Image (tube, grey):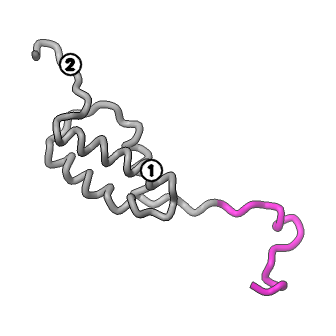
Amino acid sequence: MTDSQLPRGITALIPSAPAPATPGQRAASQLLHLRTAEVPLPLLAAAAELIAPQLESTDPVTREAAADVRARLLAALDGTGPRTARPGVD
């Protein structure tokens, strides 16, 4: 960038907007807040595979969220995740 391309005046004081989040980053954020759900096991396995590429994101927050979400998905697949009591079911 040359001197003529640098922002001048008031525009130099206005921060540029952050880059928009990718679909994977939004999914990781949304799944992180999910507490309970009943879904077929193949769907859990697919979600674990789909979130895996976010583990190598350049954004540390995205990597951390993806790791936590994937760990929860894998724990649910292994049967070690949290269970919800359903009335009438032992």
The picture places residue 82, in percent across and down from the top left corner, at: 26, 29
Q: Quadrant of residue 36?
A: top left
Q: Quadrant of residue 1?
A: bottom right
Along the horizontal axis of the image, is 86 left or right of 15?
A: left
Q: What is the three-letter code of the residue carrying label 2?
A: Ala
The picture places residue 72, in percent across and down from the top left corner, at: 30, 41
Say which of 58 and 37 sits in front.
58
Which mark lies nearer to you, 1 or 2?
A: 1
Distance between the alpha carbons at the discs numbered 1 and 2:
29 Å
Say which residue label 2 marks. 85
Q: Which structural element holds mark 2?
A: loop
Q: Which structural element holds mark 1?
A: helix
The picture places residue 65, in percent across and down from the top left corner, at: 43, 48
Image quadrant containing the C terminus: top left
**Is residue 6 located in the magenta-colored stretch of the structure?**
yes
- The part of the chain drawn in magenta is 1-17
**Is residue 2 located in the magenta-colored stretch of the structure?**
yes
Say which of 67 and 8 sits in front.
67
Q: Earlier in the sequence, mark 1 or mark 2?
A: 1
- Residue drawn at x 16%, y 13% is 87
Taking the view exactly as shown, the residue that stands out farthest to the right is 9
The picture places residue 35, in percent across and down from the top left corner, at: 34, 32
The image shows residue 30, relative to residue 16, as above or below, that is: above
Q: Quadrant of residue 83?
A: top left
Along the horizontal axis of the image, is 77 left or right of 19?
A: left
- Residue drawn at x 83%, y 85% is 4
Q: What is the three-letter code of the residue carrying label 1?
A: Glu
Q: Which mark is residue 64?
A: 1
Q: Which mark is residue 78?
A: none
Say which of 71 and 20 sits in front.
71
- Residue drawn at x 23%, y 23% is 84
